[in-house]
Amino acid sequence: MPEIKVTPLGAGQDVGRSCILVSIGGKNIMLDCGMHMGYNDDRRFPDFSYITQNGRLTEFLDCVIISHFHLDHCGALPYMSEMVGYDGPIYMTHPTKAICPILLEDFRKITVDKKGETNFFTSQMIKDCMKKVIPLNLHQTVQVDDELEIKAYYAGHVLGAAMVHIKVGSESVVYTGDYNMTPDRHLGAAWIDKCRPDILISESTYATTIRDSKRCRERDFLKKVHETIERGGKVLIPVFALGRAQELCILLETFWERMNLKAPIYFSTGLTEKANHYYKLFITWTNQKIRKTFVQRNMFEFKHIKAFDRSYADNPGPMVVFATPGMLHAGQSLQIFKKWAGNEKNMVIMPGYCVQGTIGHKILNGQRKLEMEGRATLDVKLQVEYMSFSAHADAKGIMQLIRMAEPRNMLLVHGEAAKMEFLKGKIEQEFNINCYMPANGETETVTTNPSVPVDISLNLLKREMALGGPLPDTKKPRTMHGTLIMKENSLRLVSPEQALKELGLNEHQLRFTCRVQLQDPHSDSDTLHRIYTHLKSVLKGYTIQHLPDSTVMVESIVIKLSSSAEDPNTKVLLLSWSYQDEDLGSFLSTLLKKGLPSGLC
Amino acid sequence: MKLYCLSGHPTLPCNVLKFKSTTIMLDCGLDTTSVLNFLPLPLVHSPRLSKLPGWVSKDGTVNLEKELKECAGRVFVDSQPEFCLPEKELLDLSTIDVILISNYHCMMALPYITEHTGFTGTVYATEPTLQIGRLLMEELVNFMERVPKAQSATCWKNKEIQRMLPGPLKDAVEVWTWKRCYSMQEVNSALSKVQLVGYSQKVELFGAVQVSPLSSGYSLGSSNWIIQSHHEKVAYVSGSSLLTTHPQPMDQSSLKNSDVLILTGLTQMPTANPDGMLGDFCSNLAMTIRAGGNVLVPCYSSGVIYDLLECLYQFIESASLGTTPFYFISPVANSSLEFSQIFAEWLCHNKQSKVYLPEPPFPHAELIQTNKLKHYPSIHGDFSSEFRQPCVVFTGHPSLRFGDVVHFMELWGKSSLNTIIFTEPDFSYLDALAPYQPLAMKCVYCPIDTRLNFHQVSKLLKEVQPLHVVCPEQYTQPPPSQSHRSDLMLELQPPPMPYRRCSVLSLPFRRRYERIHLLPELANSLVPSEIKPGISVATVSAVLHSKDNKHTLQSVPKPPPVPPTKKRKRVIEEPPEVLAPKPLLSGAVPLEAFLATLHKHGITEVKVEETADGHILHLQAEDTLIQLEEDGTHIVCDNNEPLRTTLRDLVLRFLQKL
């Protein structure tokens, strides 16, 4: 039985360093190649030694597919391709290909230049890695090789995020990456067709959450920002440079315009302007409203939002600052946080999920004293707010996607074990399909049951369809007979006659003749008629003919009658049939042996 | 399989393919050359045009001075310009399932086909094709609607009258079917039926046919189409280019191995080299400006204009044209320039990599930013106050019959300092200029047509090797003006099948096989046996299910156990339920081996008698005869069903079942 194997090297019952290996139809595919924000040691990257202990990965992988530009999905890519060694194709969408190297370079700078780590990938390695990337277009069917094909679908989550359908023969897997089933202020909703994969591998970040409407969350967010500004406080919003940041910028920009607010809004890194430029050039990846109006008004040109300078953090008075990175684990957002943490008038709003081990995660869990580097502790007095703006599907969204794709099996990754467990139960109950949630390094094997494609001769098919009538009768299924010829790699189904001819074989006729004696005191022709009537009444739906040369034919079985020389009342029936009519012939001989019922006329 | 040809214009095709059970329209081109027979529509009242004399036949019997005007010896219809539509009578357009669009120039007749004909199908096009096609339609509608003309001339179409008119009106075909432009409402309704597709996307039609667009290299989002089932493949090639301009390069390899290749949209200028034309364009432009004249470039709002602007971007400084204003005037100028920058996925590699920087892929963004290129929706409004001469104006429509270009013709036509440079190949420039004669302005003809020429296409066909080629009849002979140039036609073996307007071709297909799926349970139950080395056969008895044109075979369901009822005793008399013929047999039964087998089964008293064709075995104890021959076995056995079935099974052991 063919089977599909799925092994998470990362993101198995965990969020971070997404990296999932799939073996399908003899092909090995790596889905995402991310880093873990919560670790600074070896655990930061997926454990590639699982694939091979020594040497390069090229011969073990047919392709690598990156779902979107977030570092927990692509952060280990240069390490994998340049330091471990992989020269095969890497697929990602155009926006991902554009933005991913910038974030990788940023990540490298923080790690090497600021933290002084060595043995890390270099700028050149990022460039070399990106040279191996083949861009994917939405809905384009990409033939990786003769057997393996992949197709990308819109995933919402961030600019350029894609879900991917991987197909070998009639077996297939869908990997969602991160996705969002509700459109937001700048992106559309994820969509996939009814592709009925054998396995749907879905993220499950918000496995147990059913979020209230986006409008409520937005109103809440604006209210909190507004209140803090009114009382002269400062608002820090840690974000990643691309993605949520643009959505929140659009939100604040329109709010500031409407309320005529004067407090400054800053965006921390130099990346913003560049980032907004990407959004302008990839406008076809945003939501419909933005796409429709972009000629008149480009939503990514902001009037109220200005570039941030480090010195502004000490300015008096209210302000809103978007700063990177999003989980307060390093960089400018952490610096500003340290400055502002002591004042209860200030506020930090965490607009997304925070990985375990980050400061973001700690303060969200209510920790009020933080240990910083070098024994110092930081008292957290400012208000800490969590607003789920990160664009992941919630439980409802995940169920909605299952309904869309109709998978035969479900496999959860990118979530916390306990929450997955809950969702797994719900899925198994509602859809009656198996749901798996392997841990890292654990292999889940799913047996598939693919149907076998065969070429049927048009003559045979047409004959069969004509016999079956225009509409199939479900109550009385018709059986068709053919011969399957297996030659090299071709499978052809033809009529037995055609098969004989094609293979140059002679037909061997097997015939049976059987004599049945019958006591029937009538004339020969009367007896024959009685037989005819009898068979007519027993064999409904068969062709029965009474031929003038004193024979009866049932389908192609011949029944001849002669009377015995000694006793005219003893009739001798001669039945003759070919092997093809064996069932009917055998039945007839048995039936006639029992004699004719008396009530016949 | 049939092809219905609804348009005779080789670069504005409209064909309908009946393939398996689907009806597929390939492109929806609108022949706009008909507008050349009409008088231009001026934006501002033109005393010259209004003073043109009406036409009266020489003998004075026909007086059409209200409908027809004479200018420099040619006669023009004074009416809202009309277009020549694809043939509507050849087949019922409401039966069309889908329309495949290859590029934005080949969809301009869409509203005529999808509206008011009962069409209920889907139109497939790429996103750039849809967006730019929409802009071109919007522009066309705008050009027509902003100068409404009350008069609708119809008398001249009368067959008797048309016969008496001077050429080319006399020779115009199908004039009764000519139609005025559609409305914006019809455009919106037509375009709402478009479903977007990406290159190499596989679209299933009713489970019977798969269609897939391929990059054709001609314009933004332009595509060729593959229409195929598991065993048949039709390639539709329309408007393709192998030159390196802005669009993604042409995908040639996917066209390989097609049974039929329908070839349309070759270059209309087989003898003009686009690169040379571009050079002429630049030098003529610079010369005119230096001499203090203005340059008028009649053009479409999308397409070659992007390449012209890019060429000028590099040329401006070296030709010291830095201070010359460049104007692009069209109701959709801004949209066209903006849209061109957001389709990175559809651009050539060079332009694509610019987006990664991130920089706009086309340099006209910089021309606009530095105020060298300005765009306006029309000559009214801001343009009239900001307009400086000498200048270069890009504007439509290339036919010179409507759009802002009409105004510039009236304005600049009288001075020999000015130059008009034709770059679009769709209209004969002499015909286009006819209603403006006499003209003092210089005329330069630099048609830029990047589509395949005959040399390129024959190389391409050698490469992709279709079994049959179908093409417009124009491609099977040299152009009438150059009848000696046998290199300007398609020469193929077997010769291409030519079509013309209203042709119905039967495509040479021999369908022999169809794809069917064996369900796993059935596949597992098959018992293959090797007949010859490397060839195995298995008999298949299964139930056929056909749904949505997909066929599957599944195992014959086991009959449900008969419930024990009172009729139980009659069960024996039930005839076999299903008509289940046994497989055919092949091979021969060898005498010695068969005798040995009989022996093993306790049948020892066998008398063998040799006959002409084989042997007769007489099983004496059982009083049964078996006739063994090369191609047949006959068992004569009375009244002993168990014996008969035993013998049957023994014989079957030696035979192959098919």
Image (cartoon, coloured by chain):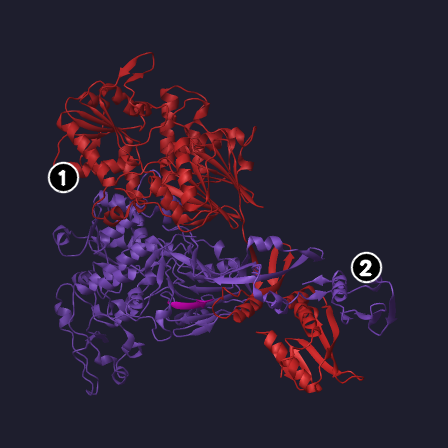
Chain colours: A red, B purple
Q: Residue at x 19, y 25 (%)?
A: A234
How far apart are the alpha carbons under marks 1 and 2? 101 Å
Secondary structure under the numbered disc 2 in the rendered image? loop
The kind of residue on which mark 1 rests is Arg
- Is residue B353 visible in this depiction of the protein? no
User: Closer to the camera, B235 or B119?
Assistant: B119
Q: Which residue is mark 1?
A: A258
A567 over B225 or under it: above or below: below
Q: Closer to us: mark 1 or mark 2?
A: 2
Question: Is A346 placed left or right of B503 in the picture?
Answer: left
Residue A504: quadrant of the picture: bottom right
Circle 2 marks a residue in which chain?
B
B549 over A159 or under it: above or below: below
Question: Is A97 placed left or right of B137 in the picture?
Answer: right
* Residue A469, image x, y percentages: 50, 70
Residue A568: quadrant of the picture: bottom right
Region of the chain picked out in magenta, as a range: B14-21
Q: Which residue is mark 2?
A: B601
* Residue B432, image x, y percentages: 26, 67
Please, what is the dominant secondary structure of the magenta stretch?
A: strand
Q: Is residue B17 magenta?
A: yes
**Mark sitting on residue B447:** none
Q: Residues within 10 Å of mark 1 (few under 14, many from 20)?
A: few
Question: Is B553 placed left or right of B66 in the picture?
Answer: right
* Residue A196, image x, y percentages: 45, 49
Circle 1 marks a residue in which chain?
A
Q: Is residue B150 magenta?
A: no
The kind of residue on which mark 2 rests is His
Question: Where the C terminus of chain B falls, by quadrant?
Answer: bottom right
User: Closer to the camera, A207 or A10?
Assistant: A207
Residue B44: quadrant of the picture: bottom left
* Residue B655, image x, y percentages: 74, 62
